[in-house]
Image (spheres, coloured by chain):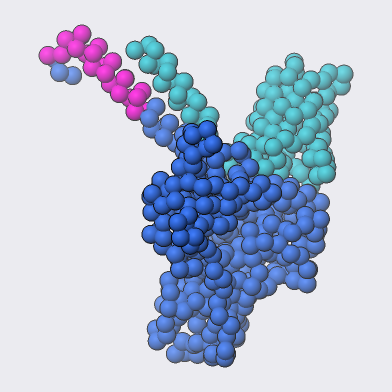
Chain colours: A blue, B cyan
Amino acid sequence: MNKHFSRANLNLQKKTLIKAILLGASVFVSSFAFVPSGQAHHPVAAKFDPSKEKSLMGVVSFVDWSNPHAHIFLNVTNSDGKVQNWAVELESPVLLKKAGWSENALKPGDHVNVTGILARNGTRQLWSEKLTLTGTGRQVFTMKDIAPRPLLNQRPTPRWPDGRVALGGTNTSIDGYWSFPSAMVLTEDGSNVQADDYGQLNSVTDAAKVAPFQDWALALFKHRQERMLQDDPMYLHCKPPGGPRQFQSNLGIKLLEDRPGDRVFVLMGGGNHNYRIIYLDGREQSGQVTGDDDNPLYFGRSVGYWEDDVLVVNTTDFNEDFWMSNGGLPHTSQLVLNERFSRPDLDTLHYEVTIEDLGAYTRNWKASWDLRWVGGEELPVHFCQDNRP
Amino acid sequence: MRRLCVTSFLIILTSIFNVAPISAQEGYPLKGSWIGEWAGNEDLGDFVLIVMDWDGENVSGTINPGTDNIVIENVTLEPSSWTVIIEGGGYTLSGRIEQLELPSRSILGTWKHGSRSGALSLSRQ
């Protein structure tokens, strides 16, 4: 200690240090505490009430062109002359761009009419269903059908020089990714259940048809459905889309083959952009990666092999911290997935999965669907980020 | 300085409670560690810790693991009402799962041991 410090100086230094530590600690901890706990990207019906329509006329004050949802902020003058600011929520910029829009379609100062549905929590938020420039009557941010064009002819399955089916692009072909799943909700093959793209059933009374549930799993699934999926941890907490869910995202996935490394990376277009690895080198599932202590994981541990033109994958060691499907099908740590990937032609990835989880279901069950090749493009940049509403 | 200390302490305390990490549990709703009170338990004290696991058919577990272990002998979960009964060592704990959708869901009800009984309040950690 510096001998020139007097006791008074020392006390002052101590006080200053304690003060700084306390303030620093408060700010540090508070910075975590006050992160909004609200929903990030979310099923629309979870936040907005389709039965409560509202029209607004106002002046744009700010265009917030950020994922997961773009927002327009409007100054609306009430009948009493008082100005209130409203947040008008739109689709994600990724989807708006695909529909041909940019953030420049509107600018601060523009006068607009908006029709939409109100937020369930009573705040001044509106999900926009129609947004029109007041002066010209021109409609903006309309969503077009972005489904892929019908295939005119079947293009042959691309293969590597050794004849193995390519799951993505090859060295000699244009790269791309897989999207437009033919089913956005995980249901047992043969069941005829209607749901929206978020997995919300048209009728919750159909819940028992979705899969062979144990009683508790069916009740939990219904509970999630009745709450309109507002508790989905993928949207609330950016949890990864583990299990079959990764292949039912409207933002797509990319299968990146590391052939020298004998493994396949599954990259997600949405969520928090993490990835899953399927090892094809014959390794065991336990002790798969040195140092991970075989902890249960969001994507489990996957090993696979080729059976003629089909990639067969077995995955175990899932944790229970996520929903394995849009719509909230429960699973337990007993979950085992047996997946089969095939590419019957260049534009089609056929995905089959057998779900083994006698912790949540009464028997094993199967589901399957196709994904469509999006050639010449990279996965969209759409992060689950910042707890943005 | 004292006011600053108190204020800072309160902010930190509040913040910690707001962000306390609770492991998510989207599977079987009873699985995990539950901490709470069985009020008026003169034998074992007011505080209780219960750990439960699910094998697909049965729930197993321990009440107060580490000290005064009581092996759970039987658990009944009624999903239509989310009512639960936990039995072991002569104790019967009965209650209902509240806020099922939260990782920090709770069980509120009563405990009973012979002629003694009291309020039960558990929160999943």
Task: Depth check: give the residue in front, A216 or A373.
Answer: A373
The percent coordinates of residue A240 (x first, y second) are: 54, 56
Q: Quadrant of residue A75?
A: top left
* Residue ID at (44%, 20%): B9
Please, is residue A313 above or below residue A238 in the view? below
Q: Going by the image, does A373 lie left or right of A103?
A: right
Please, is residue A341 above or below residue A82 in the view? below
The answer to whether residue A21 is magenta is: yes
- Chief secondary structure of the magenta portion: helix
Q: Which residues are magenta?
A: A4-25
The answer to whether residue A320 is magenta is: no
Q: Going by the image, does A102 lie left or right of A52?
A: left
Asked whether residue B91 appears in the rendered view, the answer is yes
* Residue ID at (80%, 37%): B84
Q: Quadrant of residue A300?
A: bottom right
The percent coordinates of residue A112 (x first, y second) are: 48, 52
Task: Depth check: give the residue in front, A190 or B93.
Answer: A190
